[in-house]
Image (cartoon, rainbow, N blue to C red):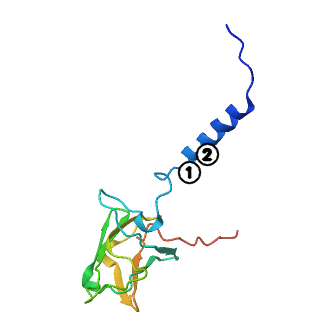
């Protein structure tokens, strides 16, 4: 066994390599490209609120029409699909930057409780999709009256 001289810089390089692996680009994908499936998709943020009787999901979908959005409920999973289409403008010579999103999106969310999918209602107002899904009777909270003797 040979003795090797301690080199503090060798340990610094291995720490740097570990940090590079931690923050590798495959781990930090841009938020607008988060999605499921083989093709990159547009990320659509959702809000999910649970009330005593319903689950309410809201999604901002500016520029879309209700017929451009598909909603399905399978078991306790809600899936929202659609596509933001690029507006075809005439001449495109002097575009300085583009921040609007284009492309297909799909969000699947697992619901926190059992729901009655047959009574679900979706509304679309001012570019915001609002999906209200009632809970099943078994999932709704029950108030138990205390009896005194």
Q: In this view, does 128 lie above or below 142?
A: below
Binning the other alpha carbons within 10 Å of mark 2 as few (below 14), some (14 to 19) or many (20 upward) gives few
Q: Residue at x 61, y 73 (%)?
A: 145
Q: Is residue 135 above or below residue 17?
A: below
Real-space Cα separation, disc 1 to disc 2, in angstroms: 6 Å
Residue under numbered circle 2: 19
Residue 71 x, y percent position in the rendering? 30, 74
Quadrant showing the N terminus = top right
Q: Residue furthest front?
A: 93
Left or right of 129 in this view: 104:
left
Left or right of 22 in this view: 138:
left
Residue 112 x, y percent position in the rendering? 47, 64
The residue closer to the viewer here, 71 or 138, is 71
Residue 55 x, y percent position in the rendering? 45, 74
Picture disc at residue 23: 1
Q: Do the residues labelled 1 and 2 touch (CB within 8 Å)?
A: yes
Residue 11 sits in quarter? top right
Residue 131 sits in quarter? bottom left
Residue 38 x, y percent position in the rendering? 29, 56
């Amino acid at each position: 066994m040979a003795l090797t001289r301690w080199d503090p810089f060798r340990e610094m390089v291995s720490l740097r390599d570990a940090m590079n692996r931690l923050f590798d680009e495959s781990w930090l994908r841009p938020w607008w490209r988060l999605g499921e499936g083989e093709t990159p998709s547009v990320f659509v943020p959702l809000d999910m609120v649970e009330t005593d009787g319903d689950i309410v999901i809201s999604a901002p979908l500016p520029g879309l029409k209700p017929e451009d959005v598909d909603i399905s409920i399978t078991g306790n999973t809600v899936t929202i699909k659609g596509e933001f289409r690029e507006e075809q403008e005439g001449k495109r010579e002097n575009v300085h930057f583009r921040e609007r999103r284009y492309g297909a999106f799909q969000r699947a969310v697992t619901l926190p409780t059992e729901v009655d999918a047959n009574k679900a209602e979706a509304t679309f107002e001012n570019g915001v999709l609002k999906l209200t899904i009632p809970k099943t009777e078994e999932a709704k909270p029950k108030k138990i009256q205390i009896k005194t003797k």
